[in-house]
Amino acid sequence: MPADAPVYSLEGKRVFVAGHRGMVGAATVRRLAREGCTVLTAPRSELDLIDQASVRAWMAKHRPDAVVIAAAKVGGILANDTYPADFLYDNLMIEANLIEASFRNGVEKLLFLGSSCIYPKFAEQPIAEESLLTGPLEPTNEWYAIAKIAGIKLCQAYRRQHGVDYISAMPTNLYGPGDNYNLQSSHVIPALIRKAHEAKLAGAPSMTIWGTGTPMREFLHADDCADALVHLMKHYSGDAHVNVGSGEDMTIEALARLVMEVVGFQGALEKDLSKPDGTPRKLMRADRLRAMGWAPQIGMREGLENAYHWFLEHQNEAKL
Ligand code: GFB
């Protein structure tokens, strides 16, 4: 079968997006609008993903045909390093409850979302999917990584034991509309956008980045990620997880200078060496997804301009 042959049609299906209010979930809901399917979402008041009984009851009542697990407890390097119990427990519960209740209620297609941090700290770059579990993890986010690795394994286990079509995608560092702009819990791109913006408004002489600025990171806009997830739902059925990335990375310092350009802040760059660098690099191989006919459409400058515009439009909503 050609790598890009359709394996599942979303037309007319009821697709539950868990985590629809998050950056990836919201982007996935937007992207699914083009697929002729009915998108189901549930507010926290109606569905507590940490509670097994709540998830089982909701799934039995609504019985979706397909599920996208975009719900997770997420955060940047400092949040992961500060709240290990929350990142491990919450993510284990969310994925276990959703995958088991999906099977219990006959869900025919499920996509589980992991992260590039599942790979060993010093994995050979670019990182192939086969690198999983071949070396020690990055200590600052091993808790989140172990939870996400367990999610991959749980999907594989249900596929092998029960023959269900549950797949896993491993996105790289994501950014875009709906991102978290709280400087303590956010990822690097929203943090740098906010810092550059506030430094510009204040006429500050400089802005500060965490760490040495030498680590390298790959980035993908949330709308590109959502497009890749829908592509995988339609074209992929296998027990191996699939990397979802742009295939290009840059140093944090180069990123900071690009953000300063986009925001229009001309000050100096200071470095707070008391903050962790984390893993030195985590560029992923993209050939498996490319072979299925998918490639990203949003470049870094266009993506950063889009993210900054969203930040300016939603400053009162963004988690500041
Ligand atoms: O995006 P980030 O928090 O997560 O940090 P990771 C990326 C790099 O940017 C690190 C540096 O080397 C940070 O030290 N950095 C510089 C900053 N300035 C800042 C800043 O103001 N804020 C932040 N947050 N970083 C995460 C994992 O690792 O990757 C998560 O902890 C998840 O679990 C996510 O997997 C995708 O890329 O280091």
Image (cartoon, rainbow, N blue to C red):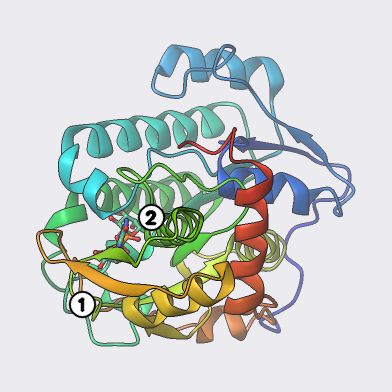
The part of the image, by quadrant, that contains residue 31 is bottom right
Amino acid beneath label 2: His
Residue at 49% x, 84% y is: 247
At horizontal 49% and vertical 70% (from top left) the residue drawn is 265
Residue 246 x/y as whole percent: 53, 79
Q: Is mark 2 within 8 Å of ligand 1?
A: yes
Q: Position of residue 280 (x, y in %)?
A: 21, 77
Q: Height in image: 276 above or below 288? A: above
Residue 119 position within the rendered picture, expressed as x and y whole percent measured from the top left: 26, 68
Residue closer to the observer: 238 or 127: 127
Examine the image and state in which quarter residue 294 appears: bottom right
Q: Secondary structure at mark 1?
A: loop
Q: Is residue 314 above or below residue 123?
A: above
Near-viewer residue (74 or 184): 184
Disc with the residue nearer the chain's start (1 vs 2):
2
Query: Image check: 272 left or right of 298?
Result: left
User: Mark 2 falls on what kind of element?
Assistant: loop
- Residue appearing at x 71%, y 84% in the figure: 2
Q: CA distance from mark 1 to mark 2?
A: 16 Å
Q: Position of residue 11 (x, y in %)?
A: 87, 50
Q: Disc number at residue 187?
A: 2
Residue 280, label in figure: 1
Location of the N terminus (image quadrant) = bottom right
Residue 244 in view of the camera: no
Disc 2 crowd rating (10 Å Cα; few below 14, some 14-19, many 20+) is many
Say if residue 172 shows up in the picture. yes
